[in-house]
Image (cartoon, rainbow, N blue to C red):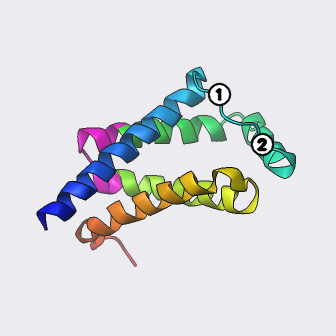
Amino acid sequence: MQLRKTILGIIQRIFGLALLFFGINKIFQFVPLPAHQGFAQSFLEHLTQSVYIMPIIMMVQIIVGASLLANRYVALALVIMFPISLNIFLFHAFHAQAALVPATVFLIWNSALMISRKDAYKALPV
């Protein structure tokens, strides 16, 4: 039981750091991300041109990452992050398979952390 809590704590911190890193990287672009081709590139360009989608995603990543690192409002942060994690996974599964492994890892981490806090979600309407 203690080992499980330790592993989940490590996953939470790594996930938080990764979200914070990628969210901040979208602002300052200190690490260039690989360019996509075809529909994936067009799709991302359209999201960027919409003016509000990418900044919202960036801010959610930064806030959720900070929340996970501070160990505050973790259950809420994970619920907010899940649709983004799922869409990142689906985007890479269908349009940009080169980064499918990290996208899958993010989705698994988000899911595992949510499952570990399933008692916090019992009050949610079904």
- Toward the bottom, the furthest residue is 126
Q: Is residue 68 above or below residue 96?
A: above
Q: Residue 83: within the magenta?
A: no
Q: Going by the image, does 25 lie left or right of 17?
A: right
The image's mark for residue 36 is 2
Residue at image point 77% right, 35% down: 49
Q: Which residues lie in the magenta part?
A: 66-76
Q: Going by the image, does 98 lie left or right of 123?
A: right
Q: Amino acid at mark 2?
A: His
Residue 83's spot in the image, x, y percent? Answer: 53, 58
Q: Is residue 32 above or below residue 97?
A: above
Residue at image point 56% right, 60% down: 86
Q: Residue 71: within the magenta?
A: yes
The image's mark for residue 32 is 1
Q: Is residue 17 above or below residue 117?
A: above
Along the line of sight, which residue is nearer the eye, 2 or 62? Answer: 2
Residue at image point 68% right, 62% down: 93
Along the line of sight, which residue is nearer the eye, 81 or 105? Answer: 105
Can residue 83 be seen from the camera position used here? no
Q: Where, quadrant-wise, is the C terminus in this rendering?
A: bottom left
Q: Amino acid at mark 1?
A: Pro
